[in-house]
Amino acid sequence: MKWYIIRRTLWAAFASFIILTITFVLMDQVPNQQIMQAEFQAAVNDVDVETAVQAEKERLGLDRPFHERYVDFMTNVFQGDWGWSYEYSQPVIDVVRDTVPYSLLYGVPAIVLSTIIGTVIGLYSAVNQYTKKDYAATFAAFFGISIPNFWFGIVLLVVFGSWLGWVPIGWNEALPKAADGSWTLLETAGSDHPAFFRQDFEGERYVGILSPANLKQLILPTFVLMTGAIASVMRYARAEALEYVDADFVKTAKSKGVSDRAIVARHIFRPASIPLMTILVGRILGLVLFGSYLIEVVFGIPGIGLASFQAIIRQDTDLVAITILLPTFVAIVGNLIEDIMYAVLDPRIDYGDR
């Protein structure tokens, strides 16, 4: 097991190296919008274009040869210096630290709820195979997998935000924070709080992660992100549980008068939970992380997905590389945790000779 973990860790480092290299090369080949903007401004102001372009290249560090920039970039990343974001005018690590909490606000509940709900529906569907409820659950699963998240999010915003007015259309990034900008769970806010800027303020209002207004604006993005994840968990849970529904030990338990609930919990879910571990960490985590990109663009959530999207548009190379690397690295580590948990839960599995 020890050597297996070491080899998987080395593979994770190699995969991260490849991802960073591909990202750097692709971003280098795309025309730089900041240089194009400098060229346009020079032409409008009747300034020498070549001089302006050269000055902009020197400011961005693009006047050096490709191999020098590549070596510096890779060295800095692996040393923990993630570079500078020209889009946010601050270090990339600060951008990541500021944006990741917004992604976690709806990503964490989406992962927890989709895992629980998907597993329960999958087990129920397997025990009641080929019934109307099983067909309904299967249809819902295919619907959740097939429907594009960004389109589903726009539809929900139009219906529940614009038509019915049940949820806010715009995202208020100041709601989960205190007046000084720090994160808080729940506290009262005064009329000078940034979340209520230019709003009629009467009575007592709350801000924080658990404040009613913040939870209200989290409902739609969390629900949209859950649709695909629940469908994936449900399908895997149903498929794994079906292998044990008609097993001999299940029939024996039924003949002894064991209750249906105990049979599902002890004789079906327990053996089926081991292969389920192979998806509940890596695949669901990866699905949620990568699915958050378009969801944050649609709902205007200032999370890591929206930061990465804007960085790609503005060709902010350092920020693009890190915001792509982090979700990928998390997914790689999640797969490693899957394999370790697989061996821990099932003693028959041995990675010693691999």
Image (spheres, grey):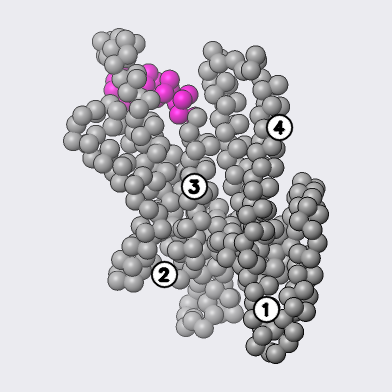
Residue underneath mark 2:
168
Q: Amino acid at mark 2?
A: Pro
Q: Quadrant of the C terminus?
A: top right
Q: Of label 3 and label 2, which has the lower sequence position? A: 2
Which circle marks residue 10 in the picture? 4
Q: Which mark is residue 39?
A: 1
Q: Rounded to the nearest whole Å, what is the CA distance between mark 1 and mark 2?
A: 40 Å
Query: Dot 3 corresponds to which residue?
Result: 288
- Depth check, mark 4 against mark 3: the one in front is 4
In this orientation, does residue 304 appear?
yes
Q: Does 266 appear in magenta?
A: yes
The amino acid beneath tag 3 is: Val
Instruction: Choose the circle earlier in sequence order: 1 or 3.
Output: 1
Amino acid type indicated by mark 4: Leu
Regarding mark 2 in the picture, which secondary structure is present there?
loop
Tell me whether circle 3 and circle 2 mark residues in contact (CB < 8 Å): no
Query: Which of the 4 quarters of the picture holds residue 353?
Result: top right
Q: Looking at the image, is mark 3 or mark 2 nearer the viewer?
A: 3
Q: Residue furthest bottom?
A: 46
Observer-nearest of 48 and 269:
48
154 shown above or below 3: below
